[in-house]
């Protein structure tokens, strides 16, 4: 009986170990949505805008345009969160993410420096 229990336990352990071999490794933490929520994305884009302004790769008009759009997105983000007790519904989140993607793509210096979104 003891030999049978050891054999059964060994077979179960081997089956469990082999079952995990087919699974791909977990994605890098940067690509996990929870790491790059909308607030983090807004902060990242704000840093990029500030950097572009400081190093001169964003001219005055482009800086004002992208900063104004980011301010509008921030305002809507905060307003929507306040309205929904700190959360966002799916369509609102998707709209804000779409707008952040578009804004990010519009920043002149970002394209010229060949940087990519970390999310």
Image (tube, grey):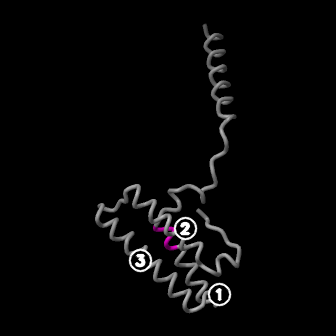
Whole-percent x and y of residue 71? 43, 79
Q: Residue at x 41, y 55 (%)?
A: 90
The kind of secondary structure element at disc 3 is: helix
Residue 41 counted in the magenta span: yes
Q: Residue at x 42, y 74 (%)?
A: 74
Quarter of the figure with the C terminus: bottom right
Using the image, determine if residue 65 lies above or below residue 83: below
Q: Does the residue at mark 3 contact the one at mark 2 (Cβ under 8 Å)?
A: no
Magenta region, main secondary structure: helix
Q: Earlier along the polypeptide chain: callout 2 or callout 1? A: 1
Q: Please give left or right for residue 109 compared with residue 42 in the image.
A: right
Q: Please give left or right for residue 53 compared with residue 76 in the image.
A: right
What separation in Å lies between label 2 and label 1 (alpha carbons)? 20 Å
Task: Please provide the residue range marked out in magenta.
Answer: 39-43
What separation in Å lies between label 1 and label 3 (alpha carbons)? 22 Å
Using the image, determine if residue 37 lies above or below residue 104: above
Q: Which residue is mark 3?
A: 72
Q: Residues within 10 Å of mark 2 (few under 14, many from 20)?
A: some
The kind of secondary structure element at disc 2 is: helix
Q: Please identify the quarter of the rendering in which residue 21 is found.
A: top right
Q: Please give left or right for residue 103 compared with residue 83 in the image.
A: right
Using the image, determine if residue 96 lies above or below residue 89: below
Q: Earlier along the polypeptide chain: callout 1 or callout 3? A: 1
Q: Earlier along the polypeptide chain: callout 3 or callout 2? A: 3
Residue 56 counted in the magenta span: no
Q: Residue at x 54, y 70 (%)?
A: 102
The kind of secondary structure element at disc 1 is: loop
Q: Please identify the quarter of the rendering in which residue 81 is found.
A: bottom left
Q: Which residue is mark 1?
A: 57
Q: Does the residue at mark 1 contact the one at mark 3 (Cβ under 8 Å)?
A: no
Q: Which residue is mark 2?
A: 101
Using the image, determine if residue 65 lies above or below residue 35: below
């Amino acid at each position: 009986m003891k030999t049978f229990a050891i054999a059964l336990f060994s077979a179960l352990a081997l089956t469990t170990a082999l079952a995990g071999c087919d699974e791909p490794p977990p994605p890098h933490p940067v690509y996990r949505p929870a790491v790059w929520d909308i607030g983090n994305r807004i902060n990242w884009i704000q840093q990029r805008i500030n950097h572009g302004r400081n190093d001169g790769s964003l001219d005055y008009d482009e800086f004002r345009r992208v900063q104004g759009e980011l301010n509008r997105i921030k305002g809507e983000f905060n307003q929507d969160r306040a309205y929904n007790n700190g959360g966002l519904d799916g369509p609102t989140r998707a709209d804000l993410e779409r707008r952040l993607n578009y804004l990010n793509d519009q920043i002149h210096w970002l394209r010229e420096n060949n940087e990519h979104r970390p999310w």
